Amino acid sequence: MQIREGPARRPAPAAAGALRSPMSAMMLAMFATMASFYVAGRLWQDAQNRVYLIKELDRRTGQGQSAISVDDTLKVVACRQQGKRLASLEMELAAAKHEGFVGKYSPETNGTHSKKPLIVIGIMSSFGRKNYRDAVRKSWLPTGSMLKKLEEEKGIVVRFIVGRSANRGDTFDREIDDENRSTKDFLILDDHIESDEELPKKTKSFFANAAETFDAAFYAKVNDDIYINVDTLSAMLETHWDKPRVYIGCMKSGEVFSDSTHKWYEPEWWKFGDGKSYFRHASGEMFVISRAVAQFISINRSVLRTYAHDDVSVGSWMIGLAVKHVNEAKLCCSSWSSGLSA
């Protein structure tokens, strides 16, 4: 049997593939390098565009710095540290009170060798009531250097509170300005127009301005026909020194009058319910609030609602706050003959 041999098979062209492999790797490396340069260039260009847009936005909006600067960040950190320190001090104070400690007033300096007041007393007065003011000066309120001594030694600041005339600069305004130049015992409310119907707004303005002007522990509103024993008042306040938010007065309630002819008519009577009875509040002859409460009034003066009477108005602000209501018998009319009255 004869076997036929076919043509010989050619070997696979391995050599050609081997020759093309270095060339492909070189081309791939070149493409990768070019792609890297392209991507880096685009990223750099985008970064430059962002820098330009930020600078342009700052220039057009007038903002040359970020929303929160380094200084602002440091202030936030400092505030947090102060908050922690305050919380620690409150805990220490609570522990001390538990052991029977009662704080006493001690005048502090504010860096200018002036003493921090214990209380600022605002005597509500108005045009045409100079005789009442003179009666107060002759009875319990010292004048001249003795008034300054009262402030420096006992921490008691007293000012007559008067607004401005509707006709700014008229005879009423000039008389008050002349009297104040002589006595230096006024706090003139330039943002308030003097009017008997606007007493609640005047009281609100007094507390707001007093809190901004004097860094006192307490602030009191007093009528100009009330006579005060400042030593008795000071001793009474010492018993409330440990209360950060306090509202002190002769607490009362009473009927809400809806008859427009009545002396104590309340135009907003319907807001007090079907029983027509006021909530508990301090009598308007004299009441005291602590600094935190006065600061609240100062900050929120534009949105605090006033009613027909200043005592009810202030009492309404206290309802929604975490404030300690103190019914102080020494501030009631029945006890003035032996209490705060001269």
Image: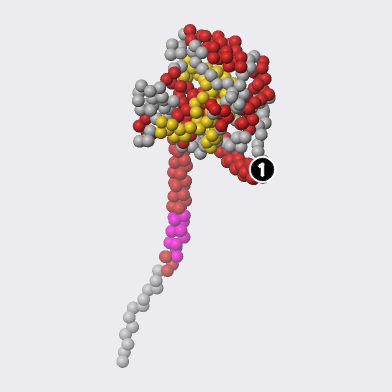
Asked if residue 164 is among those painted magenta in the image, a careful observer would answer no
What residue lies at 66% left-to-right and 17% top-to-bottom? 146
Q: Callout 1: helix, strand or loop?
A: loop
Q: Which residues are magenta?
A: 18-29
Q: Amino acid at mark 1?
A: Gly
Question: Which of 295 and 252 lies nearest the eye of the viewer?
Answer: 252
Q: Position of residue 231 (x, y in %)?
A: 65, 26
Q: Position of residue 179 (x, y in %)?
A: 56, 10
Dominant SS of magenta comes to helix
Q: Is residue 299 visible?
A: no
Around disc 1, counting alpha carbons within 10 Å, would you say few (fewer than 14), some (14 to 19), or many (20 or more)? few
What residue lies at 37% left-to-right and 73% top-to-bottom? 10
Question: Which of 175 and 67 lies nearest the eye of the viewer?
Answer: 175
Q: Position of residue 322 (x, y in %)?
A: 51, 39
Asked if residue 23 is among those painted magenta in the image, a careful observer would answer yes
Q: Position of residue 308 (x, y in %)?
A: 41, 25
What residue lies at 43% left-to-right and 27% top-to-bottom? 306
Q: Is residue 44 visible?
A: yes
Q: Quadrant of the C terminus?
A: top right
Residue lying farthest to the top in this orientation: 171
Q: Quadrant of the N terminus?
A: bottom left
Would you name the residue on which mark 1 appears? 100
* Above or below, 110 relative to 50: above
The mark total stands at: 1
What residue lies at 57% left-to-right and 23% top-to-bottom? 121
Task: Indicate the colouring scheme.
Answer: secondary structure
In the picture, residue 303 is in which quadrant? Answer: top left
Residue lying farthest to the bottom in this orientation: 1
Question: Which of 25 and 167 lies nearest the eye of the viewer?
Answer: 167
